[in-house]
Each structure stands twice: as structure tokens, then as C-alpha cells.
Image: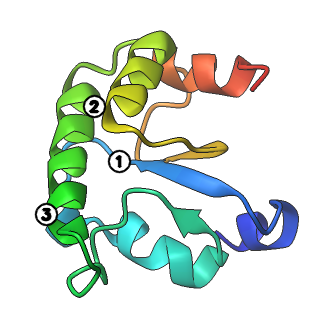
């Protein structure tokens, strides 16, 4: 997160992926905005008082992403999932994952 703070553009938005961890105990998702000083598009923590039921929307989006991380499918599937949720991100942050997994390699080698 310190590296992100030092190197990522200040207007970056991140998709934080940590498999099999619900939002209530996902330390990376909770602390990323404060420590990296960048937007986490699915950060549920701290959204309780946002208008238009944003808290409930973020919980549903987190569930959708958790379903995705159960299979660790491919990058195009992740992109389709995010598009169906109406969310865009500029970068991803993969936590507690094999760096040689198919998805990790696809993310690392993506031109975007």
C-alpha cells in the first residue's frame, strides 16, 4: 500500500481482490483507502452513511466479486462482472493469492 501511495496516480481507482474473505474482516479493503490514499471501488467500510443505499449496493457488489474469486476464473470474466456492476477501475490489488495463478498472470500481463 505504501508503494501504491508513492507510485500510483492520485486519481487511480483500485479493485481490491482477496479470495474467500467477507468484507467485514477484509483488512486490505478496509485499510487500503487510508494507507494507499487511493479509491477502492468496492470499499464497504465507511459507506454506511452514504446516500442512495450505497452501503447495500457495495455489499451486493462485494458478494458478486467473492463469487468470482471462488473460481478465480479469467480476466475477461472479471471485466464482465465489473461491467455488469457498473464499476470501473484503473488498477487491481491482489492479496493472499498465488502470484502464478492464471488470474494473477493475466492481470500482470494486461496492457490495461
Q: CA distance from mark 2 to mark 3?
A: 20 Å
User: Where does label 2 land, which residue?
Assistant: 69
Residue 101 seen by the camera? no
Earlier residue among tags 2 and 3: 3
Q: Which residue is mark 3?
A: 56
- In percent of width and height, residue 93 lies at 55, 48
The residue mark sitting in front, 3 or 1, is 3
Residue at image coords 46%, 31%: 98
Q: Give residue 18's mark.
A: 1
Q: Quadrant of the C terminus?
A: top right
Image: 71 above or below 87? above
| Label of residue 38 in the image | none
For the point 37% across and 57% down, which residue is it?
42
Residue 2 appears left or right of 8: left
* Distance CA(mark 2)–CA(mark 1): 8 Å
Q: Is residue 31 visible?
A: yes
- Which one is nearer the viewer's eye here, 40 or 48? 48
Q: Nearer the viewer, residue 47 or 21?
A: 47
Mark 2 and mark 1 in contact? Answer it, CB < 8 Å: yes
Amino acid at each position: 500500500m505504501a508503494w501504491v501511495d508513492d507510485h500510483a496516480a492520485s486519481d487511480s481507482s483500485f479493485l481490491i481482490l482477496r479470495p474467500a474473505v467477507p468484507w467485514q474482516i477484509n483488512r486490505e479493503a478496509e485499510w487500503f483507502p487510508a494507507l494507499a490514499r487511493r479509491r477502492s471501488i468496492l470499499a464497504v467500510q465507511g459507506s454506511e452513511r452514504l446516500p442512495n443505499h450505497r452501503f447495500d449496493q457495495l455489499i451486493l457488489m462485494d458478494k458478486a466479486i467473492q463469487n468470482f474469486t471462488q473460481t478465480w476464473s479469467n480476466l475477461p470474466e472479471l471485466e464482465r462482472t465489473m461491467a455488469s456492476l457498473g464499476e470501473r477501475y484503473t488498477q487491481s490489488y491482489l492479496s493472499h493469492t498465488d502470484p502464478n495463478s492464471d488470474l494473477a498472470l493475466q492481470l500482470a500481463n494486461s496492457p490495461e
